[in-house]
Amino acid sequence: MALSRSRNLAAVVLIVALALGLGSSAVLAPEANALVSISTLTVVDGAVLISHDGADFTSAREGDVLGAGDTIRTGTGAAAEITYFEGSSVRLEADTEIVVERLRTEADGGTVIGMMQTLGRTWHVVTKLISGSSRYEVRTPSSTASVRGTIFAVDVRFDADGPSATVTTSEGVVLHTAADPTVAEATQVRVTAGQASTKSASKPAEPVRAATPATLRDAPARPATMPRPAKSPKPASDRADLRSTAQAADPVLVAAQPKDRAKSSKQEPRRDR
């Protein structure tokens, strides 16, 4: 049985390699699609908890593999960062919680990433989305932020009037959508670089405003090259075993780090005296 399982897993990996080599995800079976959509917890600083598929929370470690249905929670003074399979990343600040809802590739090679942020602040560095089917969305209790190649923050707070979400854009454009209690339809605004938008579940939509300089200073820089997900220890379960086998794949919100090149020094020719 162990030999059969190894052969099946090897076949799936081969399918993924062939599909990526052809530049298409149309031939991917569900198991192969799960492999190429694996994402990784690349930074853990302080008290960070992880829950896989609704299981009990345990202490997170750098290199932990994430899939749809997993939850990350940071404690007071803690921080974490997730690097998604197509190169985008999200940084969780202290006292923040997100649920990874969607991680998949589409038939045309597009990528779909979706998460639910219930509390705290996150910063997202989203790769440029090439395919029309690609999507990167952050849902909150009061609104949804949708982007296509952007650096932006989502800040979820609760007060006496209920939840509110503030989107701050450092680079690109974010579409901030929410139900407006004063009208029958949802409202959507474009939040461009240097702007902020707040949506509340119980208040009328506020106009877009200039973002505070202090918030913009916290924005992460877009890396010149995307890092590869750190390898995690081989898990025991079949589900985790399938996850840890995956490598970074498609180019929305981890490709290889450049190898260090040996520095060569030129010696001056010896002069005869």
Image: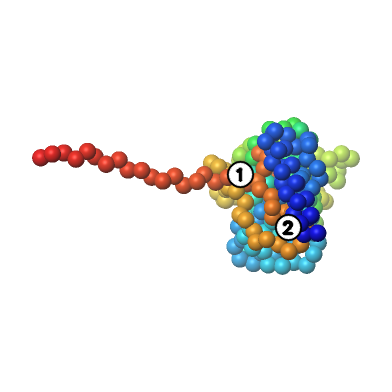
Binning the other alpha carbons within 10 Å of mark 1 as few (below 14), some (14 to 19) or many (20 upward) gives many
Between disc 2 and disc 1, whose residue precedes?
A: 2
Residue 7 vertical position relative to residue 22 in the rendered view, above or below: below
Q: Which residue type carries mark 2?
A: Asp
What secondary structure is marked by label 1? loop
Measure how far apart labels 2 and 1 are at the Cα level: 21 Å
Residue 157 vertical position relative to residue 109 in the rendered view, above or below: below
Q: Is residue 57 left or right of residue 94?
A: right
> On the image, which quarter does residue 180 sit in?
top right
Residue at the far left in the pictured view: 273
Task: Please name the residue shown 61% across and 39% down the image.
Answer: 171
Spot occupied by residue 109 in the image (x, y as percentages of width and height): 73, 35
Residue at the far right in the pictured view: 184
Residue in front for this viewpoint, 146 or 207: 146
Look at mark 2 in the image and give the residue it sits on.
241
Q: Is residue 73 left or right of residue 42?
A: right
